[in-house]
Image (spheres, rainbow, N blue to C red):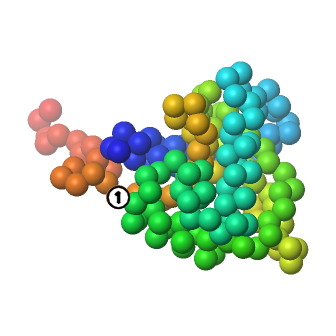
């Protein structure tokens, strides 16, 4: 669980940086099609995004947990319920999915553009990861850490005292 949690946090940070740099530079997947292919499983990440939309439309906690690649536990059921309350059951129709394997063959970014039955737009960007051959979206952000483990420090290193 600790390894998966660290990978999820790392992937989310890289995705945020990728999104920020893409917005700043005007980078678009349509301008660089060579970055949106994967030799191992080109459609797996796209299928995971489609499964996410299906989970939203069916308001399925189980499907959302599956597409998120997390354990079926109290915390994941609570977070899935929150996601479904915000976005579920709205009849989303996928308009566009763009996949970029910009972080290696097993990790990348997915951009989803969809519209609900009332015409409201949904635009979202996800980190997609492949673990043991299965693609998942990083949609669960409140994963608990392992009990008894201290989180990694995020403070900047301090310079040593004068004299060094």
Give the quarter of the image for residue 53.
bottom right
* Residue 64: percent from left, percent from top: 59, 58
Q: Nearer the viewer, residue 48 or 62?
A: 62
Q: Residues within 10 Å of mark 1 (few under 14, many from 20)?
A: few
Quadrant showing the C terminus: top left
Determine whether 132 is above or below 118 in the image.
above
Determine whether 44 is above or below 53 in the image.
above
Q: Residue at x 80, y 40 (%)?
A: 29
Is any part of residue 121 visible from this angle? no
* Residue 146: percent from left, percent from top: 27, 51
* Residue 40: percent from left, percent from top: 67, 23
Quadrant showing the N terminus: top left
Q: Residue at x 63, y 51 (%)?
A: 126
Q: Residue at x 41, y 42 (%)?
A: 4
Q: Residue at x 78, y 44 (%)?
A: 98
Give the quarter of the image for residue 36.
top right
* Residue 69: percent from left, percent from top: 52, 48
Q: Nearer the viewer, residue 3 or 28?
A: 3
Is any part of residue 120 visible from this angle? yes
Residue at the top extreme, as displayed: 39
Left or right of 101, for residue 98: right
Determine whether 157 is above or below 94 in the image.
above
Q: Assign a secondary structure to mark 1.
A: loop
**Total label count?**
1
In the picture of the structure, the residue carrying the numbered disc 1 is 144
């Amino acid at each position: 669980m600790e390894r998966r949690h660290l990978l999820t946090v790392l992937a989310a940070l890289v995705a945020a940086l990728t999104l920020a740099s893409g917005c700043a530079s005007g980078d678009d997947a349509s301008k660089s099609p060579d970055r949106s292919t994967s030799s191992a499983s080109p459609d797996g990440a796209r299928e995971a995004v489609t499964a996410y939309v299906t989970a939203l439309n069916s308001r399925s906690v189980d499907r959302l947990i599956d597409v998120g690649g997390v354990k079926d536990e109290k915390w994941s059921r609570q977070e899935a319920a929150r996601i479904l309350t915000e976005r579920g059951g709205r009849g989303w129709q996928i308009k566009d999915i763009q996949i970029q394997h910009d972080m290696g063959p097993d990790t990348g970014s997915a951009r989803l553009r969809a519209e609900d039955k009332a015409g409201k737009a949904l635009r979202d960007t996800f980190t997609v990861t492949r673990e043991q051959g299965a693609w998942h979206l990083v949609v669960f952000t409140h994963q608990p850490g392992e009990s008894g483990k201290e989180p990694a420090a995020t403070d900047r290193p301090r310079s040593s005292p004068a004299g060094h």
